Amino acid sequence: MTLKYTFQKKHPMCNDEVGMKWMKAAAEKKPFSTDVVGVSYMLAGDALVSNDNPAATDPKDGGVWVQEGPHLMILLPTTDSIAALSRDPCSGGHYVMWDKTPLVQMMIPLAAKPKS
């Protein structure tokens, strides 16, 4: 597996080939699908993002917003294996992000979230 580094000023990440296609689809607001498992990771964490809508830009618009610390993102050919996982990023442990969109992924936090 070849990982490619995607430079973002504050939120660097590494992606395999599937992750790069996923990132391109997200940036271009196009559909995404894969026949194999893909892996991306952000060991420096991410910005505040909507857990529900990959195109959302304003937390005041509602939905569940999360700022994840270091984490892995697993991209899957089907959602069958993650059907029973939580969609709540605050439930502790791994969860599903962007459910019911072509950009659905399994998020695996690598650090505990600070208590509110």
Image (cartoon, helix red, strand yellow):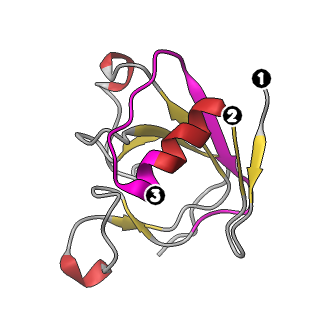
Would you identify the image quadrant in which residue 32 lies?
A: top left
Residue 41 locus on image (x, y percent): 67, 46
Q: Are marks 1 and 2 in contact (CB under 8 Å)?
A: yes
Q: Quadrant of the N terminus?
A: top right
Q: Which residue is mark 1?
A: 1
Residue 35 locus on image (x, y percent): 46, 15
In the image, residue 41 lies in the stretch drawn in magenta: yes
Q: Nearer the viewer, residue 15 or 90?
A: 15
Q: Nearer the viewer, residue 5 or 68?
A: 5
Q: Amino acid at mark 2?
A: Asp
Secondary element under disc 3, as helix, strand or loop, is helix
The magenta-colored residue range is: 25-46
Q: Residue at x 51, y 48 (%)?
A: 24
Q: Which residue is mark 3?
A: 27
Secondary element under disc 1, as helix, strand or loop, is loop
Against 108, residue 88 (above or below) is below
What number is the disc on residue 36? none
Q: Nearer the viewer, residue 38 or 31?
A: 31
